[in-house]
Image (cartoon, rainbow, N blue to C red):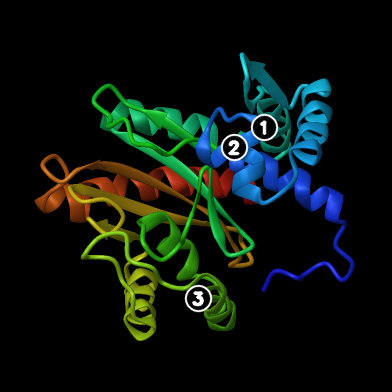
């Protein structure tokens, strides 16, 4: 479970709420931000102008939106992660080989975070992006990670984040999820058959350290029309497993 701050700083919470609202809604004026967040216009204005002076918010006419300074922070964090450094060339190679969308995801506080993605020549243009956060139960990447976490940790994640449905195929029952995770452990990869997005299939393989600790997952996503029969159950899983094997060897040795 995420530990709550014993003495949260209200000023910081207000700043973060403004940032999150701008991320969620896009360019917004001070009056509208104040209304949505139930804050005074003067308070919102002071926070916005402080963020703007440091490059985190940019003004366009009377509206404000998040600035590229956040890209600098995100790029810095990612560049310091060994997993990204090692996995990037393998992901690029796999995207070229399959022609599809290849993703790298890590788990943070019970949520999946897309660390890197690379599009092949015929890849779908999905609404995910590097830094995008997602539930773990409704996609192949997340299930590949969950399958190799201790059951107690998975129980905590389910308790905290729930099992909301994205499509009619999403797993929404706890025991059904644990049965699925057992299957993932047995075959070594996870499948997403329209569980996250109607018409989309995905194959994901966990990335593990020699100790058995799971540190992320790699996947290939494609339309159901191109990801079917043996390509879905044999060809793509083998290609992803081969790439992950290289990543694991480089990470461990």
Say which residue appears at 42% left-offset and 30% top-offset: 118
Give the image quarter of residue 137.
bottom left
As measured in the structure, the alpha-carbon distance from the residue carrying label 3 to the one carrying label 1 is 37 Å
Give the mark toward the camera: 3 or 2.
2
As measured in the structure, the alpha-carbon distance from the residue carrying label 2 to the one carrying label 1 is 6 Å
In the rendered view, tell whether residue 152 sits above or below residue 72.
below
Marks 1 and 3: in contact by CB < 8 Å?
Answer: no
For residue 230, side relative to residue 186 (left or right): left
List the residue tagged with mark 1: 30
Say which residue appears at 47% left-offset and 73% top-offset: 162
> In terms of depth relative to the viewer, which is nearer, 200 or 18?
18
- Is residue 131 in view? no
List the residue tagged with mark 3: 158
As drawn, the label of residue 32 is 2
As measured in the structure, the alpha-carbon distance from the residue carrying label 3 to the one carrying label 2 is 34 Å
What SS does tag 3 mark? helix
Query: Label 2: few (<14), some or many (≥20) within 10 Å?
Result: few
Q: Percent x, y for residue 76? A: 73, 31
Q: Percent x, y for residue 126? A: 34, 36
In the rendered view, tell whether residue 233 sits above or below residue 122.
below
Say which residue appears at 23% left-offset and 25% top-offset: 122
Query: Label 3: few (<14), some or many (≥20) within 10 Å?
Result: some
Marks 1 and 2: in contact by CB < 8 Å?
Answer: yes
For residue 183, side relative to residue 233 (left or right): right
> In terms of depth relative to the viewer, which is nearer, 102 or 29?
29
For residue 192, side relative to residue 150 (left or right): left
């Amino acid at each position: 479970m995420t530990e709550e701050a014993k003495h949260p700083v209200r000023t910081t919470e207000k700043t973060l709420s403004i940032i999150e609202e701008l991320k969620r809604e896009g360019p917004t004026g001070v009056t509208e931000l104040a209304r949505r967040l139930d804050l005074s216009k003067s308070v919102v204005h002071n926070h916005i102008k402080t963020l703007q002076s440091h490059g985190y918010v940019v003004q366009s006419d009377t509206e404000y939106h998040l600035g590229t300074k956040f890209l600098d922070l995100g790029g810095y964090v990612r560049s310091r992660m060994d997993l990204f450094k090692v996995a990037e060339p393998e992901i690029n190679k796999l995207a070229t080989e399959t022609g599809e969308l290849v993703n790298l995801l890590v788990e943070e506080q019970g949520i999946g975070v897309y660390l890197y993605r690379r599009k092949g020549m015929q890849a779908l243009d999905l609404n995910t992006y590097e830094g995008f956060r997602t539930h773990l139960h409704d996609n192949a990447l997340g299930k590949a990670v969950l399958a190799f976490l201790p059951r107690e940790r998975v129980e905590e994640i389910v308790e905290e984040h729930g099992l909301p449905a994205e499509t009619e195929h999403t797993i929404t029952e706890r025991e059904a999820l644990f049965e699925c995770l057992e299957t993932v452990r047995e075959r070594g990869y996870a499948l997403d058959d329209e569980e996250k997005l109607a018409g989309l299939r995905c194959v994901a393989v966990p990335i593990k350290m020699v100790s058995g600790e799971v540190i992320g997952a790699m996947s290939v996503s494609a339309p159901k029309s191109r990801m079917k029969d043996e390509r879905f159950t044999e060809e793509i899983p083998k290609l992803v497993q081969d790439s992950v094997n290289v990543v694991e060897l480089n990470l461990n040795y």
